[in-house]
Amino acid sequence: VCLMIKCRQRTAIAKKLRDEFGVDFSLLLRLLPNVSVLFPELISPAMRVEVGEAMNGRSVCFTLLRFVRVVSSPRHPIMLFLDDMQWADSTALDVIHTILSDTMGSCMFFVGTYRDNEVQIDHDLFDLMERLEISNVQTTKVSLAGLDQEDLNTMISDALCLYPRICKSLSDILFQKTKGNPFFVLEFMQSLKSHGLLQYNIHQKRWVWNEDIIRAEDITDNVLHLLSSKMNGLSGDVQMLLKVMACFGSSTNESVIGYLNENAEYAGVRNGLEGALSDGFIVKDEEGCLHFVHDKVREAAYNLIPDSDKKQSHPFAVMKFHYHLGTVFYSLCDGKDVGDTIFLIASQINHGKEWILRDTDLSIAIAELNMKAGKKALDGCDHNTAYSYLGAALSLLPNDHWKSHYDLSL
């Protein structure tokens, strides 16, 4: 939005922003760093240091609300799109509700998506919908299913540059295998091509296939298996990068990869990053954040962890890999101000509680790490996260912790 205001020379809006925030401009800069392009003369070195620092939920909500009121209008509303809202916490949903239910001048068109097979009936998302209706915010619910056979045939026809009637036999097989999921369709087609079952015929100048052979071939219709098979053929560096990112979640900041690259065991992750980007498994946004292109890609990457490490039949299923990754990360960042990355380190190490408790000195060190993470979460008013980390810290202390580690217990 800030870049658009600058490009379109909306000086009136820029002036309103300056008048609205005044001495609070540093708060806006911390939340929306791009606002610096509108007022470069106002940015002091101290302000640049503060950019990206954590803000509590109330400050985020109030600052965003003031910003939206200034830059939006009935003539020029703002559209906000948020994907994968099944992962949103209650604090983020509260911010969304406050902005959408505002009656003091903000004009926003909001689109949010979530996967209905990944939320339970008691998810905070449904509470948000109910509160929006109570606040008389007009809402429309749209259920998005896979492509039907006709639309899928049109998609295949367009992709292969052939008439729909020619592609009908292939699209029927694809529909049977993928149920019309566009992502699964693309992965399945790439699998057919890699197996030589979908080829471009130079003499006929078109794509050709044999549906009987495709049906007869033992090609799985499980997209997860397709992705896993594809990843198994990647270099060791790319596989390591994907496994590490899968442990960290759906997205990871590029600086995290930089930290790990300093360790000999993970020295190849930087090279692996370039390979994963070029192969299309992950994407990088303008802020240097790395994202898996799809949940199934992350799941397949997670399955690259050897079964010997995962011990799937044992409660320690993934603990060893997570724990080792966390301890390496901890040793690299010990004594440094790593900001929000402390949550990442603590969450990885906490997978290995069984190993931590075997070493008293290590238990105390990790308890202190969790305490720092909990305090940082409290600074951002994220009480649920703080409760989790502080609880983990307490569980790592010895039984006589009120005597032996009074300050830490307090």
Image: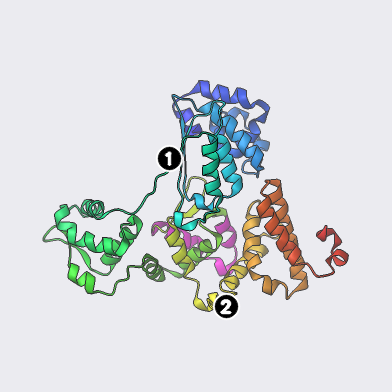
In the picture, measured across the screen, residue 174 lies left or right of residue 120, that is left
Tag of residue 140? 1
Q: Are marks 1 and 2 in contact (CB under 8 Å)?
A: no
Q: Nearer the viewer, mark 1 or mark 2?
A: 1
The quarter holding residue 44 reads top right
Type of residue at label 2? His
In the picture, measured across the screen, residue 86 lies left or right of residue 326, that is left
Tag of residue 314? 2
Q: Nearer the viewer, residue 52 or 297?
A: 297
Does 259 appear in magenta? yes
What residue is drawn where x is 22% and y is 74%? Answer: 216
Measuring from the top left, give residue 360's x and y in whole percent: 77, 72
In the picture, measured across the screen, residue 250 lies left or right of residue 358, that is left
Residue stretch in magenta: 256-279
Q: Nearer the viewer, residue 26 or 221?
A: 221
Quadrant for the C terminus in the image: bottom right
What residue is drawn where x is 66% and y is 54%? Answer: 385
Task: Measure the alpha-carbon separation of dots 1 and 2.
Answer: 45 Å
**Mark 1 neighbour density, 10 Å: few (under 14) some (14–19) many (20 or more):** few
Measuring from the top left, give residue 291's x and y in whole percent: 48, 54
Query: Which type of secondary structure does the marked residue at label 1 adopt?
Result: loop
